[in-house]
Structure formats: C-alpha cells, structure tokens
Image (cartoon, helix red, strand yellow):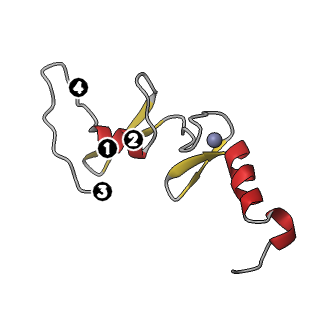
Amino acid sequence: MKNQYKKLTSHGSVSIPVAMRRELALEPKDPLELEIKEGEVHIRPYNLRCQICGETSRVKPIGGKGICYACAYAAWGTHGGFKDAGRTK
Ligand SMILES: [Zn+2]
C-alpha cells in the first residue's frame, strides 16, 4: 500500500485512511498501540482482528494480518486438513 500523508489536527488527532483501516480490519473505537521508535511514531492495532470474521479473540498474525482460530481451522480444512499436511499441490 502506498504511503499516505496526513496533517495532525489542532487536538493532536490523525485519521487513518479507510483503505488502511480495511486492510487491518480496524473498526471504530478499536484500541491502538502507539510507540516511538527512532524518532518515528508507529501505530498498530492493540488487539488484532480476524480479517475474515472480525473476531478479536484467539487471533494470530499471519503476514501482518490477523486470522482467528476458527477461520484458520476452516481454511485448513478446505486444503484437506491434517491428512494432506506437508504435501504441495
Ligand atoms: Zn475469523
């Protein structure tokens, strides 16, 4: 995704573009974690949200995106589950 440029409001707020919110499955009022690293502000979701169902519990990051246990299990099942583990098609 291309870099986005935003201005800080007089209250210190900055809006996250809708494309970025969709990419991270961010919903209004979701908590965010802010960190200063080498003079930069890094913002990340405090609780990852599943990209498929929107769940926030039992979510793990894969490639920077969240997937919950239920969706990972369902996805795994569509690929044959454990009986095909290790095979490449
Ligand atoms: Zn899910």
Q: How many marks?
A: 4
- Mark nearer the viewer, 1 or 4: 1
Q: Residue furthest bottom?
A: 88
- Which residue matches tag 4? 13
- Which residue matches tag 1? 19
- Mark 4 falls on what kind of element? loop
**Neighbour tally class for label 3: few under 14, some 14-19, many 20 plus, Cα within 10 Å:** few
Question: Hey, what amino acid is under mark 1?
Answer: Ala
CB atoms of marks 1 and 2 within 8 Å: yes
The x, y position of residue 28, in whole percent, is 40, 24
Question: Hey, what amino acid is under mark 4?
Answer: Ser
> Who's the residue at 42% across and 22% down the image?
29
Mark positioned earlier in the residue sequence (1 or 4): 4
Question: Hey, what amino acid is under mark 3?
Answer: Met
Mark positioned earlier in the residue sequence (3 or 1): 3
Which quarter of the rendered picture does the C terminus lie within?
Answer: bottom right
The x, y position of residue 62, in whole percent, is 57, 56
Depicted 87 relative to depicted 57: above or below: below
Q: Residue furthest right?
A: 83
**Neighbour tally class for label 2: few under 14, some 14-19, many 20 plus, Cα within 10 Å:** few
- Mark nearer the viewer, 4 or 2: 2
Residue 1's disc number: 3
Residue 22's disc number: 2
